[in-house]
Amino acid sequence: MKKISKATDIIAITSLLLPTFAIAGESVKVDSIEVYSPTYLPSIGLPIKDVPYAVQTATGEEIREQAGVSIADYMVNNLEGVTVNEVGGNPYQLEINYRGYNATPIMGNPQGLSIYVDGVRANMPFSNNVLWDTIPDFALDDMQLVGGSNPVYGLNTLGGSLSLQTKSGRTFNKSAIDGSTGSWGRNTGLLESGGVSDDNRFDYYAGYSYFKEDGWREPSPSEVQQWFSKFGYEDEDSRYDLTYTGAHNSLVGNGMVPDYLLGDDLKGVHTLIDKTRTQYNQVQLNGTEFVSDTVMSSGNLYWRNLDQSTYNGDLNDEYENPGDDEGVINRSKTKSNVYGGNGQFTFDNDWLSRRNQLIVGAGYEYSKVQFKQTEQEIETLDPTGFFSGDLGELEQNSGLTGQTYTYSGFVSNNHALNDQWSVNTAARYNYVVIDNDDTFNPAGDSRSLSGEHDYDRLNPSLGLTYNPNDNLTTYGSYNESSRAPTSIELGCANPDNPCMLPTQMADDPPLEQVVAKTFELGARGKFASIYDSNMSWNISGYSATNHDDILFLYTESNSTAGYFDNVDKTKRQGIDVGLSNAFETFTLSMNYNYVKATYGTDINMVSENNSSSSDDDEGQISVEDGDYLPNIPAHSLKVRAVYNPQSNWYLGATMTAFSSSYMMGNENQENDSSQSPFVRSEVPGYAVVNLDGEYNFSHMLEGWKIYAKVTNLLDNKYYTGGRIAESRVNADRSFSDDEIATSSMIGGAPRAGWVGLRYEF
């Protein structure tokens, strides 16, 4: 294999271009370079026919064209196996679920997906959560979603890994101005520019985006500012990039609302206001070097800084008698710094006279998180949902400094046994040390969070592919991956001292690390031309088991009080099916997913307002092996159609449909909704249709484009998640001395539309 001597060739490998087998996108890349980089760092690349697991991809252009504000929206509307729970109540705070595993910005929620941007892990150190508002979507060049617990992708890859690559001056060699306006007072702006020096050695890309809206629920304003810049150097054998990512954001997400307060338009609120402010900075240096024609080194160094604060107006859980304060203002402050580096060597040399690719790599990361939370009682809940009146004393209830040291090493090898069979083996060793220092409770206090914990594990992987012909690939694989408990989980693990999600701490009994084991069988291929078309398809089936899974177990149904604990097992089993057909002027793509996400052991939970709960045992419900995990639809169907009669315009439509799911608090599936007028057992299924289109004034006004996007075209009313809970807010918004059993729901956004102009030069 010759050295890569052109920037475009290096970027083609780094971009991980694959055929779009199951993605509902505008094109089917059956004729593109079918290579895949088997790690989160750039490598020489493998033929896709030798990859023994499911992979989905999309380009930055496909992401930009469709409606939505982040990469999370695109995943929900297009990718197999992805569902959503808008638990945060803000478009940038989506809880993504892939094959029954979460990636969410909410601290404390269990995370099962690893996220990488240009080879740097984007999961935050305190809780492994993912802040979608810190990822500059405008700068994305492409993405890939890899299914399964592939150990090469490191910690938190329990159900899959998302790898994102950004633009450079070589992939975006122009400038653009973009702006849009429309529903909910949403206005956006974008400036971006990229280019290459005259001697072809240096390139640059820089962009700034601005997003502001009033929100469709009242009040829920948001403002998001993102920066991204990349400066690159390249010669025949080398590629180096220095990048900066920044964000300054204010998000209001008013969360779940009692069903009877939502109203017919689903705009109702419970208590106000829930605001998150984020300041984010990241600097990284990426390098790729060809040592010889068949040996490639790649790596990165990075620093990340997060300064985040929250302000939440909540009902006072300590309210007991008339005259008590009705509300409490919870505030938190989180500061984190992360330093790390990754490196690997790729050896693309034949072995036993057959193609063989060996990758050896290592990584190190150090993080320091400083956390503080306070609460302040406030006198009165107003009919508006805000609190007013006298304020109580400001009280700190937790403080923690958490330091995490992560060391890892991995090896991956793909060997062609013959022209049809190949075998893929991999293993990764992780060693994690978590050192918590309580800055609130004094040393020796029984509630102290201070403690040091360490975890290590060697995770293996084995896969086989069989290619009977050029148009068919079959595969099977077995993978193991793990995640260590986070500082926030270790700081809230005592049932005798429950804490409040997402942040308040109690103390830290030890937790076991989570280990996921996944079996997967699949096939993918393409058909010969049918009616002058190109058709691609894929199917995969998987069975994943989490051992010692960490769940948040509630201790009271009228609050978010609870603790983290290991449970013996949880399981995910499912099937993904995708089909895409590209005609001359029309593309039709669709995919279907079935996932059975269940508990794998018998456990007791608290849900006092579940009709099956025990009055004699503090509202406990019995959850049995085989009961479904909440807020995960079993079925999803996604269809994407694009009409493109001429090169300068297109019209696209996307339909997403999800089946019903069980409410949180009904984990045993035994709640009888007829026993209470306000308590649901399930979140109903729903379907949404979105439209997008673009016209390029290529002949009249060179460089100008006009585009439009419509979400929820049919204005369907739907919910994305819910929980059986309690409230003291009456239907007329007066404050009740008695607790009211209710379903707290997250409503879906109504019909909306935006129009925009883009000028490229």
Image (cartoon, rainbow, N blue to C red):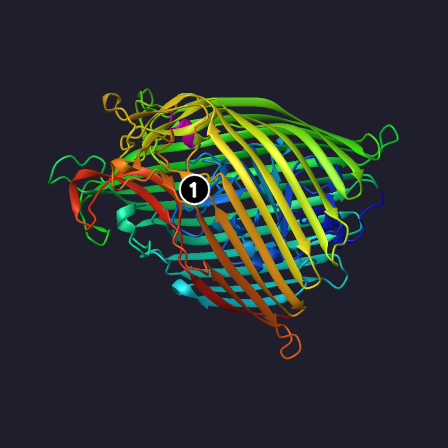
Q: Is residue 2 above or below residue 706?
A: above
When asked about the image quadrant of residue 449, the answer is: top left
Across and down, in percent, residue 373 comes to 32, 38
Secondary element type, mark 1:
loop
Which quadrant is home to the N terminus?
Answer: top right
Most foreground residue, 29 or 227? 29
When asked about the image quadrant of residue 161, the answer is: top right
Q: Which residue is drawn at 51% across and 36% down?
A: 101
Across and down, in percent, residue 640 comes to 58, 55
For the residue marked with disc 1, what is the amino acid? Ser
Q: Residue at x 71, y 62 (%)?
A: 584
When asked about the image quadrant of residue 666, the answer is: top left
Is residue 164 rendered magenta in the image?
no
Which residue is labeled 1 in the image?
Answer: 660
**Which residue, as the protein is rendered here, is positioned at the far right?**
353
What span is in magenta?
Answer: 488-493
Query: Is residue 145 in sight in this rendering?
Result: no
Query: Is residue 375 in sight in this rendering?
Result: yes
Q: Is residue 439 above or below residue 116?
A: above
Question: How many numbered dots are placed on residues in this image?
Answer: 1
Across and down, in percent, residue 235 comes to 78, 52
Most foreground residue, 655 or 567? 655
Most foreground residue, 391 or 683? 683
